[in-house]
Image: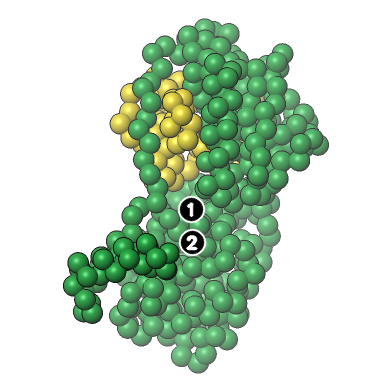
Chain colours: A green, B yellow
């Protein structure tokens, strides 16, 4: 059985964030985590090749990059494609999920990714891609590789997979026919009673977790509105005086912009562990477009700009915590009589 | 972030390079930015042209704020 593994630039041993633009490439045989995967696969399967790409490129340019990656995978003539584990790295997770989806769609090869359930890519792609859940950090590498090896062998043998909870992958939202020990009404009452007794129970119909927000009505006239700048890119004054965390931030901050027309090079730095800040440090307006906003205010196209910007760091942000930041920021925006927001998300 | 700000009643234009992700998580007014590490920048351009491009990008955000939408909508800046 021939297996090809997809990795990012880091796990392929090419470098960290500075190499996030690494173009797609391939090596024969196993690399990095693939070496341990090979030991777990045993004699039945061989990691015949490793294909890699920089996280920045695969996240921002999937339409041009993913087909190239799939082409490199195809050259190894695999029976199964595995991707990751990406843990909770968002861009790496997106790369893994997109490569798996494309490999299956274009090559007809079964594919399997591994990442943390809270990885944004898992939420987005688990319906179309088989995903093995992992821990948030690489501390769970051994367990992730064991699960990947087991499922990869089953896929390669062409064995049908059972339900997610039994096989150990993230639910894909597919319904399978199965014999139940009791009727639907009996099972429903059983669930209700378990809940009332505070006993553990597993729902049979999982509800979607991303809720929808009804968009507020549009601004009637931007030339009369008061606009605020908000970002989760981690842009802070040089020296990071309030110590914004570069990962899993537990605070948000507001920094004054009074008398500032243009965010000057050298005056700001980036507290964000998720991307290469070189371009932003060179010109912070590339993150928070103050120069453009001020210019449009001068031209009368924006009524007024709040003399402050709000910042937190979205890197590996925990959804619930980010929502709390956002509600607190919203409360402050109301006190500042702001009408609308320009949000920059990285 | 965008959803909570809109839930609180503030029309919010989100500039991001990952527009497809923003659509799926349910941000409503999405402006396609350039790259992940510099959504409002185009470092390859001469400074004056980059600034002009950024002004156009913010204009797209203003258009998003002034447009009635029913759900996640991507507003595209002009040019490559």
Residue at image location 49% in from the left, 80% down from the top: A149
Q: Is residue A346 above or below residue A267?
A: below
Asked whether the beta carbons under mark 1 and mark 2 sit within 8 Å of each other, the answer is: no
**In the image, is A72 to the left or to the right of B74?**
right
**In the image, is A291 to the left or to the right of B1?**
right
Residue at image location 38% in from the left, 13% down from the top: A220
Residue identifier under label 1: A120
Element assignment for label 2: loop
Q: Residues within 10 Å of mark 1 (few under 14, many from 20)?
A: many
Q: Within the image, what quadrant is residue A163 found in?
A: bottom left
Quadrant housing the C terminus of chain A: top right
Marks 1/2: CA distance? 8 Å
Q: Is residue A24 visible?
A: no
Q: Residues within 10 Å of mark 2 (few under 14, many from 20)?
A: many
Residue A11 position within the rendered picture, expressed as x and y whole percent measured from the top left? 62, 66
Residue at image location 64% in from the left, 33% down from the top: A311
Residue A282 position within the rendered picture, expressed as x and y whole percent measured from the top left? 71, 33
User: Residue lying furthest front in this view?
Assistant: A197
Q: Is residue B22 above or below residue A266?
A: below
Residue mark closest to the camera, 1 vs 2: 2
Q: Within the image, what quadrant is residue B76 found in?
A: top left
Residue A327 position within the rendered picture, expressed as x and y whole percent measured from the top left? 53, 34
Check chain identity for marks 1 and 2: say if they share one.
yes
**In the image, is A155 to the left or to the right of A188?**
right
Residue identifier under label 2: A117
Residue A317 position within the rendered picture, expressed as x and y whole percent measured from the top left? 58, 48
């Amino acid at each position: 059985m021939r297996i090809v593994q997809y990795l990012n630039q880091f796990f392929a041993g090419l470098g960290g964030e500075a190499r996030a633009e690494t173009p797609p490439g391939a090596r024969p045989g196993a690399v990095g985590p693939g070496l341990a995967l090979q030991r777990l696969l045993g004699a039945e399967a061989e990691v015949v090749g490793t294909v890699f790409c920089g996280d920045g490129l695969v996240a921002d340019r999937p339409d041009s990059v993913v087909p190239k990656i799939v082409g490199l995978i195809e050259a190894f003539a695999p029976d199964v494609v595995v991707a990751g584990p990406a843990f909770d790295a968002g861009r790496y997770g997106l790369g893994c999920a997109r490569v798996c989806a494309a490999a299956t769609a274009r090559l007809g090869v079964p594919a399997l990714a591994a990442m943390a359930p809270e990885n944004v890519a898992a939420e987005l792609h688990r319906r179309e891609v088989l995903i093995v859940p992992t821990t948030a950090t690489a501390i769970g590498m051994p367990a992730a590789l064991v699960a990947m090896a087991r499922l990869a062998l089953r896929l390669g043998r062409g064995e049908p997979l059972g339900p997610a909870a039994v096989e150990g992958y993230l639910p894909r939202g597919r319904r399978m026919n199965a014999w139940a020990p009791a009727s639907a009404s009996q099972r429903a009452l059983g669930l209700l009673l378990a809940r009332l007794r505070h006993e553990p129970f597993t729902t049979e119909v999982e509800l979607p977790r991303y809720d929808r927000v009804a968009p507020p009505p549009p601004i009637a006239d931007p030339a009369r509105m008061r606009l605020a700048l908000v970002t989760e890119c981690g842009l802070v004054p040089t020296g990071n005086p309030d110590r914004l965390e570069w990962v899993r931030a537990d605070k948000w901050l507001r920094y004054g912009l009074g008398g500032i027309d243009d965010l000057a090079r050298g005056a700001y730095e980036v507290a964000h562990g998720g991307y290469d800040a070189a371009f932003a440090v060179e010109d912070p307006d590339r993150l928070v477009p103050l120069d453009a906003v001020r210019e449009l205010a001068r031209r009368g196209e924006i009524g007024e700009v709040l003399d402050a910007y709000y910042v937190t760091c979205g890197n590996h942000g925990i959804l619930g915590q980010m929502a709390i930041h956002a509600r607190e920021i919203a409360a402050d925006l109301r006190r500042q009589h702001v009408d609308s927001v320009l949000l920059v998300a990285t | 972030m965008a959803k909570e700000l809109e839930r609180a009643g503030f029309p919010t234009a989100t500039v991001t390079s990952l527009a497809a992700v923003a659509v799926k998580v349910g941000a409503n007014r999405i402006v396609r930015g350039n790259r992940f590490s510099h959504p409002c920048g185009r470092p390859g351009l001469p400074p004056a042209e980059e600034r002009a491009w950024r002004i156009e990008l913010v204009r797209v955000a203003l258009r998003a704020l002034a447009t009635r939408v029913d759900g996640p909508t991507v507003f595209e800046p002009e040019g490559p």
